[in-house]
Amino acid sequence: MNREEERFQEKIEANMGFDESHPDGRAYRQVFQALSTPPRYTLPDAFADKVLRKVEQKEQRSLRVTYAWLVAGIVLLMGACAAAVVLTGFTFEAGFLRNMADYKGLLAFGVAFVLLLHWVDKRLIHRHDPS
């Protein structure tokens, strides 16, 4: 843009009028008239409903993909565990459970302690206010 065009635009922006003798005067008038009129558009009546429907469809699709990846991961994990058991010759032995019979008192104390902690948590820490 040359200096003359810059001065012309500054005059227009300062509302000093349009110079019709300038080559771009008529074009500037048309542009500014078009910009001064508000756009004529209206949204359809069900526009918001359509937008919400599209968002919900996208969320459902995303949820389906998430569940598909979850199922694929579980199946692959089970397959990897089965392959590891077969390849390593793993055998399950529960002999350690026989020795636990000697610790009945310790097991009873552990269960009672966990129940006590649960009761304290419900009564003192995580109270539910009815209001």
Image (cartoon, rainbow, N blue to C red):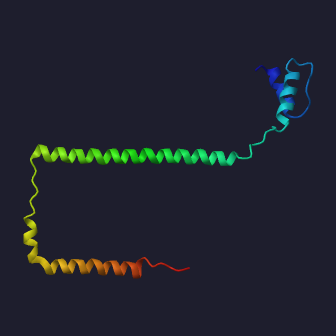
Relative side of 41 to 77, left or right: right
Res. 17 image quadrant: top right
Indicate the quadrant where residue 87 lies: top left
| Up-down relation of residue 124 to residue 79 (above or below) | below
Q: In which quarter of the image is the C terminus?
A: bottom right
Determine whether 79 is above or below 29 in the image: below
Q: Residue at x 50, y 47 (%)?
A: 60
- In the image, 35: left or right of 77? right
Q: Position of residue 41 (x, y in %)?
A: 79, 39
Instruction: Relative to 107, say whether 71 is above or below.
Output: above
103 left or right of 113?
left
Tally of marks: 0
- For the residue pair 77 and 38, the one nearer the viewer reads as 77
> In the image, what residue occupies the spot 56% across and 48% down?
56
In the image, 9 versus 112, the foreground residue is: 112
In the rendered view of the protein, which quadrant contains the N terminus?
Answer: top right
Residue 61: percent from the left, percent from the top?
Answer: 49, 44
Residue 82 % position (x, y): 19, 47
Residue at x 39% of width, y 79% of height:
122
- Vertical position of residue 126 compared to residue 85: above or below: below
Q: Is residue 120 left or right of residue 47?
A: left
What residue is at 35 percent from the left and 81 percent from the top?
119
Q: Position of residue 91 (x, y in %)?
A: 9, 53
